[in-house]
Amino acid sequence: MPKKKEIDSKALIKAVESGLTRKKIMAQFGFKIPGQVTTYYLDALIEAGRARGIVGRPPKAAGKEETVKVNQRGSISVPKEMIERMGFKEGDRFQVGKTRAGIILKTK
């Protein structure tokens, strides 16, 4: 993927809000395709705090990685705090599977 073009976000927001046409904005900022105007404008609004970004997977907290292990009976015990943090409750059932990345639990 090519490196993202550096632009003046405030200038782009001002250009769009002043009513410049997409074609003029493309020429002013050196965009090659119309979709770039929309993408960079949205990024500029997010950077300025005027639009919310789309939330993805939350980052892992440093040092908060917990491990579980299999006991002598072959059972895995998961600490209560971890269960609560994940939003599981008593009686939840899971289908267990193995993937290349590890183990997957699917709620039933």
Image (spheres, rainbow, N blue to C red):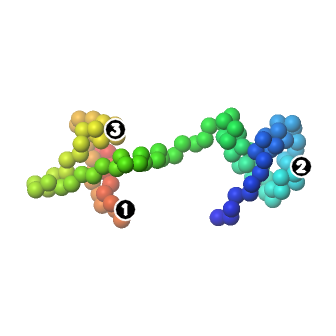
Which SS class for mark 3?
helix
| Image quadrant in which the C terminus is located | top left
Mark 2 or mark 3, which is nearer the start of the sequence? 2
* Nearest to viewer (mark 3 / mark 2): 3
- Residue 72: x and y in percent read 10, 56
Residue tagged by mark 3?
85
| Residue 30 placement (x, y as % from top left) | 83, 56
Does 59 appear above or below 89? below
Disc 2 crowd, CA 10 A, few/some/many (<14, 14-19, 20+)? few
Label 3: few (<14), some or many (≥20) within 10 Å?
Answer: few
Q: Which residue is label 1 attached to?
A: 101
Asked whether, in this view, residue 45 is left or right of residue 72, the answer is: right
How far, Cα to Cα, is label 1 from label 3? 22 Å
**Amino acid bearing label 3:** Arg
Rendered view: 52 above or below 69: above
With 42 as the anchor, is 62 left or right in this view? left
**Label pair 2/1, CB-CB below 8 angstroms:** no
Q: Is residue 13 left or right of residue 96?
A: right
Label 1 or label 3, whichever comes before in sequence order:
3
| Label 3, label 2: how far apart the Cα atoms are | 50 Å
Q: Quadrant of residue 52?
A: top right
Name the foreground residue: 90 vs 9. 9
> Which residue sits at x=83%, y=52%?
29
- Farthest residue in the front direction? 63
Taking the image as drawn, is residue 16 in sight? no
Badge nearest the viewer, 1 or 3: 3
User: Which residue is at a point 21% across and 54% down the rendered structure image?
Assistant: 69
